[in-house]
Image: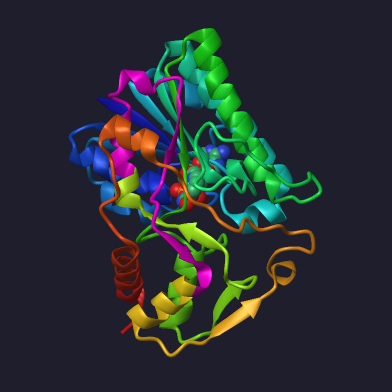
């Protein structure tokens, strides 16, 4: 099978590309390197079944030509990361909504199967935890730019489902929850790479807010295993799936575990959200998926627990440090 990954030089896309190549598929990537990096895919470039175009998906002509050659598209390209989203809402809205529309239109031309990467952010501040795919969403006001990411990804979901309904485009929406693992960058506000870097450098670990907020962190290997398997399930098309682990941890506990597992002497420093992001910033108290739907579909369950993930990230970051 020949597969196109938009955003394939990003964190998840590069892991997915490696897994698909290992399975014997041919992988094409388009990425504008806005948040991705050639470092993520350098190890793949010698593989004759791998190719990469450094360009934006807004180059519709090129995108269409690339889609024409493949059997399947994973659309991962997006403006990502709370920090980036808060600082550049206009870019976020345009990149996510227009980008997804371009991808869906190109796929529609050839009726190419497509997986759209959405996000658990769409559940917003819902208190109906664990979040089910058919649960209500609760976003904050439009004056708080953070919600532009969730709203833009919701439009992406509506678009994908509309293309499925009206144009018979085989599209699947996957709502990714916090996905982590080696190679994730901390540059755009991702918590685990930042905590690990701070711990290894002996800096204070900066916990935003009071640290009682909780998240569920799933290993990118487990996420990619599900992304690879789901496209073979006919009943998945036209559907929305949560994809994440249910092992829940508070950010305080996460910081403590990173310190313990890395043998660091770092202390925890609390930074108010208003200082970390903006005065109007709103956080999500608990984010936990109900992953029954994808579990039933694929017989999928995460194989890595949080300590295994943290150990892998710490080892990876240590290997990058000068001796
Ligand atoms: N990592 C997570 O925890 C998480 C959680 C929920 C959803 N997601 C979704 O998964 C997808 C991948 O996220 P990631 O964590 O790998 O982030 P990432 O930033 O590493 O990957 C996104 C990639 O898309 C590329 N890109 C952005 N705009 C582009 C454009 N216009 N044209 C071409 N390339 C473009 C970036 O350069 C980057 O390589 C995103 O759609 C994101 O919304 C990720």
Identify the image quadrant of residue 74: top left
Query: Is 189 positioned to the left or the right of 290 in the image?
Result: right
Q: Which x, y percent locates residue 169?
A: 46, 14
Q: Which x, y percent locates residue 92?
A: 66, 44
User: Is residue 266 rendered magenta in the image?
Assistant: no
Residue in the foreground of this view, choosing between 189 and 57:
189
User: Is residue 238 rendered magenta in the image?
Assistant: yes
Q: Which quadrant is home to the C terminus? A: bottom left
Q: Which x, y percent locates residue 30?
A: 44, 37
Residue in the foreground of this view, choosing between 35 and 173:
173
Instruction: Describe the colour scheme in one phrase.
Output: rainbow
Q: Can residue 59 be seen in this view?
A: no
Q: Is residue 213 visible?
A: yes
Q: Check the image and name the residue furthest to the front.
A: 128
Identify the image quadrant of residue 273: bottom right
- In magenta, the rendered stretch is 224-252
């Amino acid at each position: 099978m020949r597969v196109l990954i938009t955003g394939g030089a990003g964190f998840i896309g590069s892991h997915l590309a490696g897994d698909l190549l290992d399975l014997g598929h041919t992988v094409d990537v388009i990425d504008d390197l806005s948040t991705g990096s050639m470092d993520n895919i350098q190890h793949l470039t010698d593989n004759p079944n791998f190719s990469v175009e450094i360009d934006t998906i807004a180059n519709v002509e090129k995108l269409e030509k690339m889609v024409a050659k493949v059997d399947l598209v994973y659309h991962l390209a997006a403006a990502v990361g709370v920090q980036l989203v808060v600082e550049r809402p206009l870019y976020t809205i345009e990149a996510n909504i227009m980008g997804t529309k371009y991808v869906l239109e190109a796929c529609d031309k050839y009726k190419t199967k497509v997986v759209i990467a959405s996000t658990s952010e769409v559940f917003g501040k819902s208190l109906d935890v664990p979040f089910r795919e058919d649960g209500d969403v609760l976003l904050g006001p439009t004056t708080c730019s953070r919600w532009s990411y969730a709203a833009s990804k919701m439009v992406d979901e509506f678009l994908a489902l509309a293309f499925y309904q009206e144009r018979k485009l085989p599209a699947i929406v996957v709502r990714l929850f916090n996905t982590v693992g080696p190679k994730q960058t901390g540059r755009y506000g991702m918590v685990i790479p930042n905590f690990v870097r701070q711990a290894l450098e002996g800096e204070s670990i900066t916990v935003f807010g009071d640290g009682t907020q909780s998240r569920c962190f799933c290993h990118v290997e487990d996420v990619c295993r599900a992304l690879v398997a789901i496209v073979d399930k006919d009943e998945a098309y036209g559907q929305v799936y949560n994809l994440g682990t249910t092992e829940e941890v508070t950010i305080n506990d996460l910081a403590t575990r990173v310190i313990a597992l890395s043998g660091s002497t770092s202390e925890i420093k609390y930074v108010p959200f208003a200082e970390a992001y903006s005065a109007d910033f709103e956080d999500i108290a608990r984010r936990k998926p109900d992953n029954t739907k994808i579990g039933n579909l694929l017989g999928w369950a995460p194989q890595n627990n949080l300590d295994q993930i943290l150990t892998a990230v710490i080892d990876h970051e240590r290997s990058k440090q000068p001796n």
